[in-house]
Image (tube, rainbow, N blue to C red):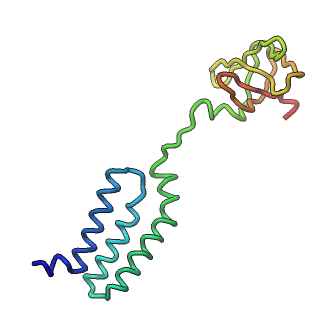
């Protein structure tokens, strides 16, 4: 019985289970690739290949899965990076609803139906109400814009 548990098949099976459990616990797509490598090594052990070839297949398949499938999975299967309305505003055209004058500390603009306190990226530029501008950055709760003609 002890000899069976020390056989390469059970060793690779144990590795595979450990990697799967770690993946379930962390949910970070960190060890699932090594579970695939362990599965390949398990198949190599079942085919009667030498421990060296089993180990080589483990590392080869793990690295291939890690480097070639991980970017795809992170992009399409696990799209946790959802743009917030904050990030979505940058680069968009906004409608100035109240004169933007940095010296007078005035200005509002609307983008995507949301009204923002707005300031010009250049203190010397005044943007009149009704004009269109482009959102350049957000600092705190203020939207910094440039007039369309300057973009």
The answer to whether residue 12 is left or right of residue 149 is left
The answer to whether residue 81 is left or right of residue 94 is left
Query: Residue 32 or 55: which is nearer the viewer?
Result: 55
Which quadrant is home to the N terminus? bottom left
Which quadrant is home to the C terminus? top right
Q: Residue furthest right?
A: 124
Residue 3 location, x and y as percent? Answer: 15, 81
Going 77% across and 27% down the picture, which residue do you hit? Answer: 145
The answer to whether 28 is drawn above or below residue 123 in the figure is below
Going 79% across and 24% down the picture, which residue do you hit? Answer: 132
Residue 49 location, x and y as percent? Answer: 31, 88
Going 40% across and 64% down the picture, which residue do you hit? Answer: 33
Q: How many marks?
A: 0
Residue 113 location, x and y as percent? Answer: 63, 21
Q: Residue furthest left?
A: 1
Residue 44 location, x and y as percent? Answer: 31, 82
The answer to whether residue 72 is left or right of residue 109 is left
């Amino acid at each position: 019985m002890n000899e069976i548990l020390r056989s390469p098949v059970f060793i690779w099976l144990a590795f595979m289970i450990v990697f799967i459990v770690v993946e379930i616990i962390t949910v970070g797509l960190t060890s699932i690739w090594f579970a695939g490598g362990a599965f390949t090594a398990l198949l190599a052990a079942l085919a009667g290949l030498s421990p060296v070839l089993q180990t080589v297949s483990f590392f080869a398949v793990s690295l291939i899965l890690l480097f070639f499938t991980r970017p795809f999975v992170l992009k399409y299967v696990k799209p946790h990076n959802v743009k917030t309305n904050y990030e979505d505003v940058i680069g968009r055209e906004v409608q100035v609803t109240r004169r933007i004058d940095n010296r007078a500390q005035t200005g509002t603009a609307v983008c995507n139906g949301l009204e923002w306190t707005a300031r010009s990226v250049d203190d010397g530029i005044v943007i009149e109400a009704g004009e269109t501008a482009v959102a350049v950055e957000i600092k705190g709760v203020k939207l910094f814009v440039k007039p369309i003609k300057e973009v």
